Amino acid sequence: SSDRAHGHSFSRSKYSPICSVPKIMGFDYILDSTMNPYLLEVNRFPGLEPRSSLDSDVKKAVVYDAWIAASDKTGIPKKYIQDLRPSN
């Protein structure tokens, strides 16, 4: 089947949602003295409010990559989310 948005047709399977919104989760790890990782917690709603300019750059990239992944799943052309691309 296909959907229409902004005058364009997008193909999708009958099992695909009409719209997909990325879900960003936070995974907190700790490393022991031999660098083995241990999962501490999973955050369903991680804080995306930046605390510094470097933090802002990292979080903007994560959000952009999540939207790219969502567009890959739905078949929506990436040109519709290009404005979210972080500037370097």
Image (cartoon, rainbow, N blue to C red):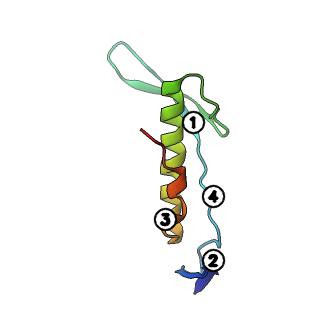
Marks 1 and 2, how far apart at CA: 32 Å
How far, Cα to Cα, is label 1 from label 3? 27 Å
- As drawn, the label of residue 26 is 1
In the rendered structure, which disc, 1 or 2, sits on the residue that comes first in sequence?
2
Q: Say if 75 sits above or below 83 in the image.
A: below
Secondary structure of the residue carrying tag 1 is strand
Mark 4 packing: few (<14 Cα in 10 Å), some, or many (20+)?
Answer: few
SS class, disc 4: loop
Whole-angstrom CA distance, mark 4 to mark 3, is 16 Å
Q: What percent of the width, then of the height, locates residue 54? A: 48, 26
Say which amino acid is labelled 3: Lys
Residue type marked 1: Gly
Residue topped by disc 4: 21
- Which label was assigned to residue 5? 2
Amino acid type indicated by mark 4: Val
Q: Is residue 84 above or below residue 4?
A: above
The quadrant where residue 4 appears: bottom right
Q: Which badge, 1 or 3, is on the more N-terminal residue? A: 1
Q: Quadrant of the N terminus?
A: bottom right
Q: Which residue occupies the foreground of this view, 10 or 30?
A: 10
Query: Which numbered disc covers residue 79?
Result: 3
Q: Between 15 and 38, which is closer to the camera in this rendering?
A: 15
Name the quadrant containing residue 33: top left
Q: Is residue 39 visible?
A: no
- Mark 1 neighbour class, 10 Å CA radius: few under 14, some 14 to 19, many 20 or more: few
